Amino acid sequence: MRSSIKQTAFNYCYWSIAVGDNDTSSIQACIESARKASIYRPFHIMTDRELDDCECYDAMSLDNPDGMNKLVYLKAAISRLSYDYFIWVEPSTRFQREPRDLLKALRRSPLHVPLCRIWPRDKPHPKNHPLHRFMIDSGLPSEPYFGTSSFWIIQHQAVDLVSSTAVGFWRKAMDQGLTVDVDAALAFTMQLFCGAPRKHQWTENPALWLPRVSHLTLSNETLQSAAIVDVGSESSSADPNTAQPTPRSQETATTPEMTTDSIRLSMNGVFEEFPSDGSGLSP
């Protein structure tokens, strides 16, 4: 499935999940950093309290196996909003400037997940790791990439297919006794639906977004030149005393009403809609 990215004004929003004191203060700081960078795109947050300068929805009580709740909220709630694209940002995200041609990161794919060749340090070398072989057996090339779900972009019309494929991969892995989180599930799906995974590595476009691991390896100049960075939990406290008043957004979007009850009805049985046999995992 491919999308055609043309030089046109696309309608997109940022979204996230923030529950608890740490995440809510962090996402508030994230939004404040965007406004200070003159970014007035809407933020839609699934949360347990009222936040400033964004649309808030009751996050309710939802199990979060391996971080897969991101896909449940995306499919059952966020996809009901009338945007062409949805951009997930971790609460620890900070904006340093407005991104240029943000949607070009899709590169004609319906999904952009930042990929990397760096295997997690707490896991054995990829070729000796069961997940490496499992990704290959599920349809990926001999050298699959890892990825992160700290920042990703998805086309609205691809939500159902991406969610079904990622959850199917997660379930199939569980059936084989493997532990797979949302990072691996999205990275697998990303590579399945794009023709050139190499171009989706975060190192291909460091001016757009940088992961927290990059803070250990890149120069200050490179870090400061990025539009969006993940600063990690150590910098996730917002100082309400430094918040500056911001003008209202010039952009508007027709947003269908989402209430707690309507979201709950949408989420009821949402996992049951996904194939449990891992069908459709091959390209």
Image (cartoon, helix red, strand yellow):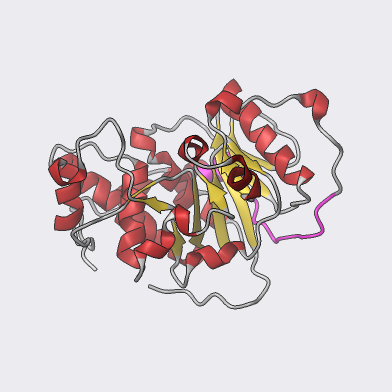
Relative to 129, say whether 113 is above or below. below
Q: Main secondary structure of the magenta part?
A: loop
Assign the N terminus to one quadrant of the image: bottom left
Relative to 238, say whether 90 is above or below. below
State the image coordinates of residue 23 (x, y, percent, origin top left): 57, 28
State the image coordinates of residue 248 (x, y, percent, origin top left): 84, 50
Left-right relation of 96 to 270:
right
Residue positioned 30% across, 63% down in the render: 192
Q: Nearer the viewer, residue 125 or 84?
A: 125
Magenta-tinted stretch: 248-263
State the image coordinates of residue 145 (x, y, percent, origin top left): 30, 53
Q: Is residue 260 magenta?
A: yes
Specify the quadrant of the image occupied by residue 33: top right
Residue positioned 31% across, 46% down in the render: 184
Residue 125 visible in the current orientation: yes
Q: Nearer the viewer, residue 268 or 49?
A: 49
Q: Nearer the viewer, residue 25 or 237?
A: 237
Relative to 255, say whether 220 is above or below. above
Left-right relation of 218 to 100:
left
Specify the quadrant of the image occupied by residue 171: top left
Q: Is residue 239 magenta?
A: no
